Amino acid sequence: MNSINSRSEQKNEASELQGNQEDKISRQKCEVCLDFFGEETLEDKKYQPKTADCDHLTEVCLPCLQESMEFTMSEGSHILMCPICSQQLEQWFIEIYCTKTMFTTYCDLALQSHLRSDPNFFWCLAPNCGSGQIREGDDPEMICGSCKASTCVHHQTPWHNGLTCEQFDLTSKKDEESQKKIEKMTVACPKCHARIERRGGCLSVICTFRNYHLDAVVTC
């Protein structure tokens, strides 16, 4: 009788041990949030984050993977990495495990990165536009296909109406020289910031700008 009970207990222990082993196999701890998760279906938020370059076992749960990808994209990058081994995730993998909104963002970022690598791609500089396009030909004036605003791709400024690029360069040079002359010949009032002309070799000048009741003394 004791022998029968002993065998029964051994079977129960073996069955319990096997069950624990199976549970350990089917449930693993996420290395990011430290919660346990299974590896059955995507619908149950259980998956195996493995790509052609990842040779590790499942070590991170789906919510943590998505949070990692979302953070990277919020920084403006489409280069998404495995949270465990830092290998770049492939597009097919991203499409499967991203939400639709996240994958749309990923595609937009990937397209922008590709366009920026083209030397003929330029952004429209009109306020609140944010569009860009590939310039065709050598004309420095690019008309935005979205908002129709003009941009000078040579100077990277909104188009200088009425001036060629050469004329704009001359105007900018004259403006720069005039500004340097003004800075050399005048000093700024620390209160109203008006430029005051310095005369002679005095150590101070007086600001008589009418917006203030008191004159402001400025050291030369």
Image (tube, rainbow, N blue to C red):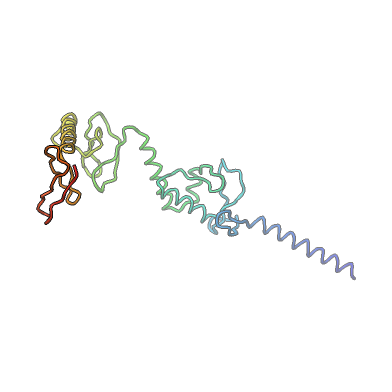
Measuring from the top left, give residue 195's x and y in whole percent. Answer: 15, 44
Q: Nearer the viewer, residue 88 or 39?
A: 88
On screen, residue 84 versus residue 18, left or right, reads left
Judging depth in this view, the residue of 198 and 109 nearest the camera is 198
Residue at position x 11%, y 56% from top? Answer: 213
Number of marks in picture: 0
Residue at 17% x, 33% y is 177
Instruction: State which quadrant residue 32 falls in.
Output: bottom right
Residue 93 position within the rendered picture, expressed as x and y whole percent measured from the top left: 51, 46
Q: Is residue 107 left or right of residue 63?
A: left
Q: Quadrant of the N terminus?
A: bottom right
Give the residue at x 15% y 47%: 194
Q: Is residue 69 left or right of residue 183?
A: right
State the image coordinates of residue 80 (x, y, percent, origin top left): 48, 45
Quarter of the picture containing the C terminus is top left
Report which quarter residue 148 is drawn in. top left
Q: Position of residue 137 (x, y in %)?
A: 26, 29
Judge left or right: residue 59 versus residue 100. right
Q: Nearer the viewer, residue 218 or 145?
A: 218
